[in-house]
C-alpha cells in the first residue's frame, strides 16, 4: 500500500510530460514543414541537379567545369572582390563605430539611425544613386574637375573600383551595427586602469582595446565577406565584363544559356563557401565569449 501511494504522483507527471511533448511537436510541425519545403528540398534538388547529366546519369562534370577555365576566374574574382569589400567595410565600419560608441546615448542613437536607415532603401535605388554620383558627369568627377585635380574625370564605373565602392556601401551598415555592439560592451575601466599605470594611447589601443574587440572585427569582416559572395545587383550594374561575379554567372547560365546543371554546381559551391564562412564566424564568436569569461574571472 505504501509503495502504491509513493508511486502515485509519478504517473500524472509522466502523463503531463508526454502531453507537453506532443503539444510541443504539434507547435513545431508547421515550422519543420516550412523549413523542409522552402529550404531543405530546394538545396537537395539543387545538389541532385548539379550531379546529373542531360540523360539523368550521375557525373562530376559540372563541378570540374565550375572549377576550371573562365568559371574558375569568375570564382577567383568573386573571392577577391568580396575580400576587398570586407576589408574596406572593416576599416570604415571600425572608424564609424568607434566614433559613435564615444557619443552620448541620445546622439549615438541618432547617428546609428543615419547609418541604418539607408539600408532600408532598395539596393537597386542605392546602386543607381552611386552610378549617378560616380559617372563621368557625376558629382564626384565634377567636383574633382572643379578642384583642378590632375586626371579628372576619373573612370569610377564599370571596373573593379566601382564594384568595390558599391558593395562596400551596401555592407557598411552590417559592419557598423556589429562593431558598435561590441565596442559598447568594452569595459572602459580597463582602459582607465591601463592609463593610470602609465600606458600611452597607442599602447592602450594595441594591448587592451584591440584584443577586446578583435572577435567582433573578425566576425564583422567574415559577415561582409559572406554577404558579398552572393551579391548580384551592384556588381552587375557597376561592374564590367572583367568583374563578373558568381551570382551574375549563375544568372547568365540560367536565363541565357539554359544551363541549369552548371548553374546548380556554381550554387552548391557558393553555398559551401557560405557555410564555411558561417562556421568560422561561430568559431570566432565562441572563442571571443570564452576570452571574455577568462578576462572577467
Image (cartoon, rainbow, N blue to C red):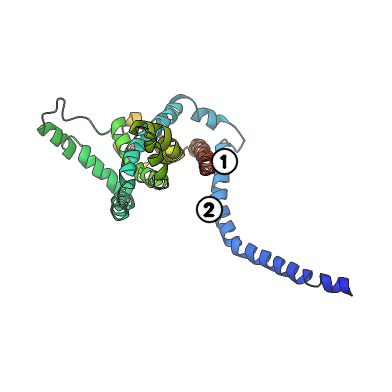
Q: Residue furthest right?
A: 1
SS type, badge 1: helix
The residue sitting at 20% across, 37% down in the picture is 135
* Residue 63 horizontal/vertical position (percent): 54, 31
Which residue position holds label 1?
47
The residue sitting at 55% across, 57% down in the picture is 34
Residue 87 lies, with reference to residue 177, above or below; the image says: above
Q: Determine if residue 225 is in view.
A: no
**Is 48 or 127 nearer to us in this picture?**
127
Give the quadrant of the C terminus.
Answer: top right
The residue sitting at 32% across, 34% down in the picture is 164
**Is 169 or 78 nearer to us in this picture?**
169
The answer to which of marks 2 and 1 sits earlier in the sequence is 2
Q: Determine if residue 214 is in view.
A: yes
* Residue 87 horizontal/vertical position (percent): 37, 33
Q: Residues within 10 Å of mark 1 (few under 14, many from 20)?
A: some
Which residue position holds label 2?
38
Residue 132 lies, with reference to residue 149, above or below; the image says: below
| Residue 30 left/right relative to 179 | right
**Is 172 or 275 nearer to us in this picture?**
172
Give the quadrant of the N terminus.
Answer: bottom right
* Residue 116 horizontal/vertical position (percent): 33, 50
**Is 221 or 122 nearer to us in this picture?**
221
Q: Residues within 10 Å of mark 2 (few under 14, many from 20)?
A: few
* Residue 155 horizontal/vertical position (percent): 22, 30
Write down the quadrant of residue 93 in the picture.
Answer: top left
Q: Residue furthest front?
A: 197
The residues tagged by marks 2 and 1 sit, at their Cα atoms, a distance apart of 15 Å
Write down the quadrant of residue 172 in the picture.
Answer: top left
The residue sitting at 28% across, 48% down in the picture is 125
Amino acid at each position: 500500500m505504501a509503495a502504491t501511494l509513493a508511486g502515485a504522483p509519478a504517473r500524472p507527471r509522466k502523463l503531463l510530460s508526454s502531453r507537453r511533448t506532443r503539444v510541443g511537436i504539434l507547435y513545431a510541425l508547421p515550422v519543420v514543414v516550412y523549413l523542409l519545403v522552402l529550404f531543405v528540398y530546394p538545396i537537395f534538388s539543387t545538389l541532385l541537379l548539379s550531379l546529373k547529366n542531360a540523360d539523368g546519369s550521375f557525373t562530376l562534370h559540372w563541378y570540374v567545369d565550375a572549377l576550371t577555365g573562365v568559371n574558375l576566374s569568375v570564382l577567383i574574382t568573386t573571392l577577391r572582390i568580396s575580400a576587398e569589400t570586407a576589408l574596406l567595410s572593416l576599416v570604415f565600419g571600425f572608424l564609424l563605430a568607434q566614433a559613435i560608441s564615444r557619443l552620448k546615448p541620445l546622439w549615438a542613437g541618432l547617428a546609428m539611425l543615419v547609418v541604418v536607415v539607408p539600408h532600408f532603401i532598395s539596393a537597386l535605388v542605392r546602386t543607381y544613386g552611386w552610378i549617378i554620383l560616380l559617372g563621368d558627369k557625376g558629382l564626384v568627377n565634377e567636383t574633382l574637375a572643379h578642384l583642378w585635380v590632375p586626371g579628372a574625370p576619373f573612370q569610377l564605373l564599370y571596373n573593379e573600383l566601382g564594384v568595390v565602392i558599391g558593395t562596400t556601401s551596401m555592407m557598411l551598415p552590417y559592419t557598423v551595427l556589429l562593431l558598435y555592439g561590441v565596442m559598447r560592451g568594452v569595459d572602459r575601466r580597463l582602459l582607465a586602469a591601463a592609463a593610470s599605470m602609465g600606458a600611452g594611447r597607442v599602447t592602450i589601443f594595441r594591448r587592451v582595446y584591440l584584443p577586446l574587440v578583435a572577435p567582433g572585427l573578425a566576425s564583422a569582416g567574415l559577415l561582409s565577406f559572406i554577404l558579398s559572395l552572393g551579391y548580384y545587383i551592384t556588381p552587375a550594374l557597376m561592374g564590367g565584363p572583367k568583374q563578373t561575379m558568381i551570382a551574375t554567372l549563375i544568372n547568365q547560365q540560367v536565363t541565357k544559356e539554359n544551363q541549369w546543371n552548371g548553374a546548380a554546381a556554381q550554387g552548391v559551391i557558393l553555398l559551401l563557401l557560405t557555410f564555411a564562412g558561417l562556421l568560422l564566424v561561430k568559431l570566432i564568436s565562441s572563442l571571443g565569449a570564452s576570452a571574455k569569461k577568462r578576462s572577467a574571472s
